[in-house]
Amino acid sequence: MNNTSTLRDYITEEAKNVEAALQEALPGEWQVPAQLRESMQYSLMAGGKRLRPILVLAAAEALGGPREAALPVACAIEMIHTYSLIHDDLPAMDNDDYRRGKLTNHKVFGEAMAILAGDALLTHAFYSIAQARKVYGIAADRVLAITEELSEYAGARGMVGGQAADMLGEQGITKLEELEYIHTHKTSDLIIFSLRAGGHIAGASEEQMNALSQFGLCIGLAFQIQDDILDLVGDEAKLGKPVKSDEKQQKVTYPFFIGIEASEKKVKQLTDEGKQALLAAKLPNPDRLLQLADYLMQRDH
Ligand code: GRG
């Protein structure tokens, strides 16, 4: 898709491409117990924004890399994201009944199968990455770098660590830096990975990789703060009636520390900082990434 289509069309089109690839990437019906496959498919195809896979594709394109070959890696990050949501919704964690307007995985398939579906998606992500070499011929050292980084950014030093810190710190967080640590690992790390993975597919230089990381860190934090603002403000508040349940008021988020207005400024400041970092690296074709940064800042869901 060229740079002149609107961002909305671009996102819709790429989300469709990712969904088709995800459907293909699931293990075959004859290979897996039917309920496990159904449970994996239920959450994987439940209609998320597909932000992370789109970032993989847009980063590869920003560097003039082979977009097609980035698809298995785009699928892999969505599998990781989906597993994290399934596990996050479990009774032992957030105990949520609904996700994306649908019953959560464990509500439909039971806790044990939801755990297994999450485990299977996590493992299958690494299989999917291997397809970038097997099917599209991406050099082994690039695929190895992507694999290593996924283990880092999604694992104990990344998203899982952020989730653990969040769980351990519940209510006990007293400093903004503690919250930033959680946001960085729980949210930004998968976003940074997505951008770097696109960079690896395209053979980015170290300087370009650093810029993608900085961009990811900034837009990831901005994304999480925006998420917290949207959660707190709610739909009715947009109509002039603040809806702030006691529970939401007490949730330790960025707006909890500095208020909504200052949080909105922070989102803008982080977005600008990320865009500057990207521009400084002079990637051949950064427009979509820059537009996506603005889109995330302005989103209302
Ligand atoms: C259980 C290991 C483990 C990790 C859980 C993802 C996560 C970590 C927790 C979910 C709660 C949360 C608010 C996480 C922050 C990241 C975030 C905003 C996730 C939602 O991502 P979107 O908006 O979701 O991209 P969709 O539904 O569009 O895919």
Image (cartoon, rainbow, N blue to C red):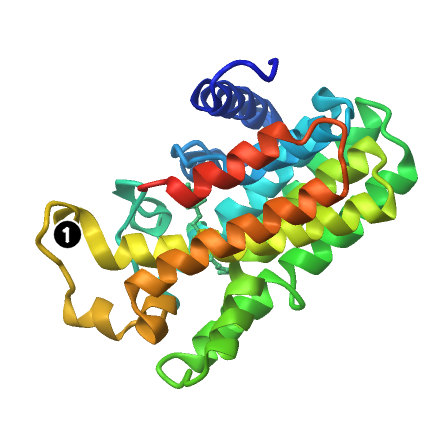
Q: Quadrant of the C terminus?
A: top left
Residue with the mark numbered 1: 237
Residue at 47% across, 33% down:
34
Total labels drawn: 1
Determine whether 294 is above or below 241 in the image: above
Residue at 28% across, 56% down:
231
Determine whether 131 is above or below 12 in the image: below
Q: Position of residue 247 (x, y in %)?
A: 20, 70
The kind of residue tagged 1 is Ala
Quick one: SS at disc 1? helix
Q: Position of residue 24 (x, y in %)?
A: 59, 22
Q: Position of residue 279 (x, y in %)?
A: 69, 40
- Front position in the image: 96 or 26: 96
Residue at 22% across, 56% down:
233
Which residue is situated farthest in the left direction here?
241
Left or right of 229? Residue 59 is: right
Q: Quadrant of the N terminus?
A: top right
Left or right of 229? Residue 167 is: right
